[in-house]
Image (spheres, rainbow, N blue to C red):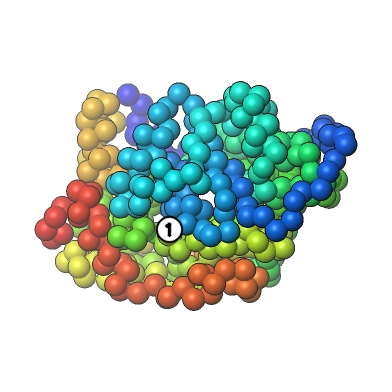
Amino acid sequence: MEPILDGVMHAATATKSAEALRALANRYSQDIPPRPSPLRHRAQGGKDVILVTGTTGNFGCDLLEALLTDDGVELVYALNRGGSNALERQKAAFHSRELDADLLESPKFRMVEGDISRPDFGLQPELLDEIRNSVTVLVHNAWQVNFNLPIASFDLFLRSLRYLADFALSSPYIELPKIQYVSSITVFQSCDVPVPVEEEPVGAGSALGSGYGESKWVGEQMLLNLRERTGLPVQLVRLAQICGDRNGYWNAAEWFPAMVKSAFLTRCLPDIDGDAAFVPNYAAARALVEMRSSPEAVLHLTHPRSVRLRTLLSSTADELGIPLVSWDRYLQVLARCVKDVGSESTKEEYVEAVRRNPSLILLGFFCTRKFEQGNEMTHFVALSTEKAQAASPTLQHLPELGDDVALSWLSAWRAAGFLDAEGQF
């Protein structure tokens, strides 16, 4: 087996220039198909019909529930990977998150199994036409979240976004359906504009740093190019770090939960003097659904009232009975844990080590963060949310994150077995 560090320290590959990103966005924006003819007006005053991708995952479940409980939505087509028992996975995901699975029996809901990497989504022509003739909003949520991959690894997702745009342009109506694209605040990972950053398009240089953030920027620019050339209505929603469902459970695969889980071996947490603008999953999902009616092309779905990350970490450390240490000290302890696993470990031994200490696979990500300003870990850049708050009452009235929220994360992780039930060392 190759040394463990080789897999985490050198995986992240960033694009070398802003020009390369712009060229890529232009390439994905070429060969625009003609609109059908003749076109007719859409009936006015009806409710929305939504096509949404990626509903079986963490954020997708809350998004689907928010859509199904919205009185302004008539029907939701949930497009997910074919051949994967998507409906059963959706039901299981709803049950595990204690969402109302009866909503999945509603006449408002249609599970559609297909392949978003194909122009026809792998659907039968009759179903494709049914969706084309009724859909008013296409919500693109499906995207791979991996900060260690180069932008070339996101080609499937960028092509899928373009196929959704082409599908919208094939509408028989003069009034085109809107594409609501779930982008990310990682388009600011090399932020090169004054803060707070306004809710508007941003240059490619701001996105340089990792393939994930770069791919999100290319998706944004592709849609803006298509809007300019065709009049396609688009809305780019830059989603911040989401941090827990109604019960507090936060996806265990993400950096903060991994860091807390690993504390049972590191016996410490880092003292990060940065800001956090995390948004709970369910609130972010509700806000996204509310935002679809806004005429704004760019919105920031981030907490309008940031808090000190140290506050959340301190509450967590106190509950676990461990100290906060400097970032340098924390990395030293984490590196020692990696060394203890050993480069000669078998695959089974490595998998077990990662299960007990998931921060092992994040060490490369952690080591690339800089904390002179204390904000790199959370990708925190001060963002304007004026337009977003006007578009979403949920975001406007979102309570500030406090000790109670951090403790709810711990409680949910214990209940799920992710953390030791006792929560002490």
Query: What number of labels is visible?
Result: 1
Q: Position of residue 170 (x, y in %)?
A: 76, 36
Q: Residue at x 51, y 30 (%)?
A: 113
Quarter location, residue 86: top left
Residue 348 seen in render: yes
Residue at which label 1 appears: 281
Q: Position of residue 151 (x, y in %)?
A: 60, 38
Rate crowding at label 1 as few (under 14), some (14 to 19) or many (20 or more) other CA atoms within 10 Å. Answer: many
Please, which residue is most extreme toward the right here?
Answer: 38
In the rendered image, the vertical position of residue 52 relative to residue 184, given as above or below: above
Residue type at numbered disc 1 = Asn
Secondary structure type for disc 1 = helix
Q: Residue at x 39, y 69 (%)?
A: 309
Lateral position of residue 104 relative to residue 173, left or right: left
Q: In front here: 134 or 355?
A: 134
Q: Residue at x 81, y 48 (%)?
A: 41
